[in-house]
Image (cartoon, grey):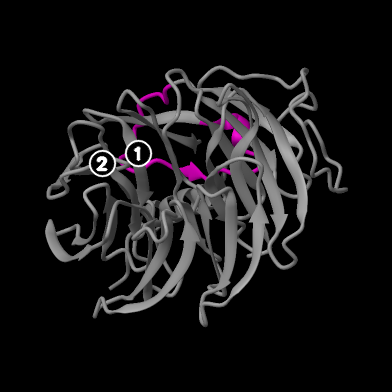
Amino acid sequence: MQQPKWFVLIVILVLSSLGLEACSFSVQTFPTPSSSEILSTSTSPAPSATLPSSLPTFPPPSPTEALPLATPTLMSIRADTTSMLKIFENFELKDIVRGLAFTPNGTVLAAAGGNTEDFAIHLWDVVSGQSLGQLDGHTGIVWSLAFSPDGQMLASVSGDNTARIWDWRNKTLIKSLDFPSQVISVSFSPDGQTLAIGGVDVPQNQIQNATIWTFAVGSWQPRAKFAEFINIGALAYSPDGKWLIGGGTSRNVEVWRSSGGSAVRILNHAHQVSKAIISPDSATVATGTCAFTTNDQCTEGSTWIWDLRTGKLSGKLAGFPDVVENLAYSADGSSLVAASRDGTIQFYDAVTYQPLFRYPFPGGISALALSPDSSFLAIGSPNGQIQIWSVVY
């Protein structure tokens, strides 16, 4: 049946309107750091960098304004975005924050610690800020936490001489492992097949021994022991899974082949090492330590940079008011964040190791974690406060 002319005219007008809307678009631009904010664009290494007196110091990030969307749009924390950090969320424990860990997808944060109370492991949804409950069972300080690479399990180590593996979603204990003394460091291998736990072993001939114990994930049967001395405060697998590093309290960080367990080299330090991490390309080790002491008190902290393959010291990043106890590389390997006990947070370009930006964190820093995709940086303090930093646009 033939349509009236007025009906055809309406159809033409509607189609024309839709065509115009389809052709319209908008472009969103992002702020570019000014030339004064870019401290170095040199590609030549400067491993012995010391914080210059002229380095700009920024106030703590300001809280992010209320977001209209349930899920914010985030940028990764990397060398070119560190100056854009904002406080995204705040959480709190009842006692000292000692361990922080993100799930592999970065959506859940686990936090624990304690000193005389609150030995529970607390869980939060990072984006919504909602509590996901807690895991109870430890009776002593919880020193460290680690999620399995598949995100299904959470491992915790404690001064109560146990390591516990949890099904954190269902709030159930999968396995409890007993040790001769306190255990303070923990890490899953990148393939998720091995769990490494570091701590104090049985003393021999009046020497306080330390050990990294490894276990097969699932059966939880022992695999190997990596011997060290005093205690194991620093522990990490290389991202490629070939190396295991550990030690710290003895002033040494040893490098072992993770498969056979053979010792390859020792990274010697003048003072104890609080933290050791390996870069995303598995080429570099960064260690947090003290550069100088007076009357057994650290008067200047430092981060030492090592070539993992050769064991050679590449340089020292100095200028911290206290010992450097926390370190993290961004996911893309472009930046390194180092934090000292007093609350100084310093970002470096991880290619040149030139300083980028420096933030003060009032109250001091006792724990730090960067989410695997570098969307969130969690910072814990001795007063129980936890701040989540992010780059939101």
Q: Residue at x 21, y 38 (%)?
A: 130
Question: How many dots with numbers?
Answer: 2
Q: Residue 252, how many percent across, how many down?
A: 59, 53
For residue 141, side relative to residue 85 (left or right): left
Comparing 118 with 371, the one in front is 118
User: In the image, is residue 323 above or below residue 310?
Assistant: above
Q: Verify CB contact (< 8 Å) between mark 1 and mark 2.
A: yes
Query: Would you call the spot at circle 1 few (<14 residues within 10 Å), some (14-19), or many (20 or more)?
Result: many
Q: Residue 257, how many percent across, how many down?
A: 57, 75
Q: Amino acid at mark 2?
A: Ile
Residue range corresponding to the magenta coloring = 63-85
Comparing 93 with 370, the one in front is 93
For residue 273, side relative to residue 300 (left or right): left
Q: Residue 202 lies in what quarter of the image? A: bottom left
Q: Residue 31, how many percent across, how many down?
A: 65, 31
Q: Considering the whole magenta stretch, tell me its main secondary structure.
A: loop
Q: Amino acid at mark 1?
A: Arg
Tell me if I can see residue 110 in this picture: no
Q: Secondary structure at mark 2?
A: loop
Q: Identify the residue position indicated by label 2 in the image.
A: 141
Label disc, if present, on residue 98 of the rendered structure: 1
Q: Residue at x 12, y 48 (%)?
A: 136
Q: Quote the CA–CA distance across marks 1 and 2.
A: 8 Å
Disc on the earlier residue, 1 or 2: 1
Queried whether the magenta region covers residue 68, the answer comes back as yes
Q: Residue 267 lies in what quarter of the image? A: bottom right
Q: Residue at x 71, y 54 (%)?
A: 306
Q: Residue at x 24, y 31 (%)?
A: 93
